[in-house]
Image (tube, helix red, strand yellow):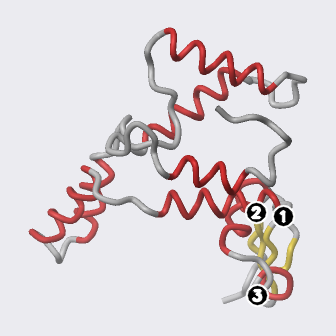
Amino acid sequence: MKRHEIKSDIAWATPTQIKVHGLDLCSEIVGTVDFGQMAFLEIFARLPSTNEARMFNAMMVILVEHGITPSSLATRMTYCGAPEAVQASVAAGLLGLGSVFVGSLDNAAKMLQEALPDPQASVDLKQLAADIVSAHRSRREIIPGVGHPFHKPIDPRTPALFKVAKPVLPAVTWS
C-alpha cells in the first residue's frame, strides 16, 4: 500500500514527519511543550506566552476536577450495573449534562460573544465587565462561568484562579 501525505489546517503527516500548526511534533513539541501548551496550540494555532500558559494550565487543572456531579454519578452507577458496556456509562454521563454544570461554560461563552461580538473592537474591558455584572445583578441572574452549586457563597476555585492571574493582570482592584 502506497503511503500518502495526510494534511489539514491543524496538522499534516508524511511517513517520516508530523507537523502541528507548523511545528515538528517529534523535534519541537515532544519534551518541550507541556500538555496545557499543547492544548492551547491546538485551540489557538500558536504556543502561549508565559503568562497565557500559566493561566491556561491553572484553568485546565480546575476543569479536570469534576467531583461528584449528577452526570458523574450516572456514569458510575451505569458502569456498576453494566461494566461490560463502557460506552453506555459514558453516554449516561453525557446525557446528564446540562446548564448547571458543564453547560455553564457554554452560557459563559455565549454571554461573552454577545457582549463582544467583534474581538478586534476597541473596548473598555473593565467597563464592559462592570456592565455585564450590573445587568445580571439587576435581573437577579447568576453570572455564568466557573462556579458550582455546592460551593456558596464563593467557589474556592475562583480566588485560586485570581491568585494565579494576579501577576498577569494589570494593577486592578478586585472587589
Mark 3 and mark 1 lie on one chain; the one further toward the N terminus is 3
Identify the residue at horizontal 71%, vertical 57% (top origin). 55
Q: Total of numbered circles in the picture?
A: 3
Cα–Cα gap, marks 3 and 1 = 17 Å
Q: Name the residue under label 1.
A: 50
Residue 101 % position (x, y): 38, 43
Q: In this view, does 59 lie to the left or right of 170?
A: left
Residue at position x 20%, y 71% in the image: 85
Residue 97 falls left or right of residue 64 = left
Residue 151, x across and y down, in percent = 37, 45
Would you name the residue on which mark 3 appears?
31
Give 166 or 5, whichever is nearer the viewer: 166
Q: In this view, does 115 lie above or below 166?
A: above
> Quarter of the image containing the N terminus?
bottom right
Look at label 3 and name its amino acid: Gly
**Kind of residue at disc 1:** Thr
Vertical order, 43 against 108 (above or below):
below
Q: Which mark is residue 53?
A: 2
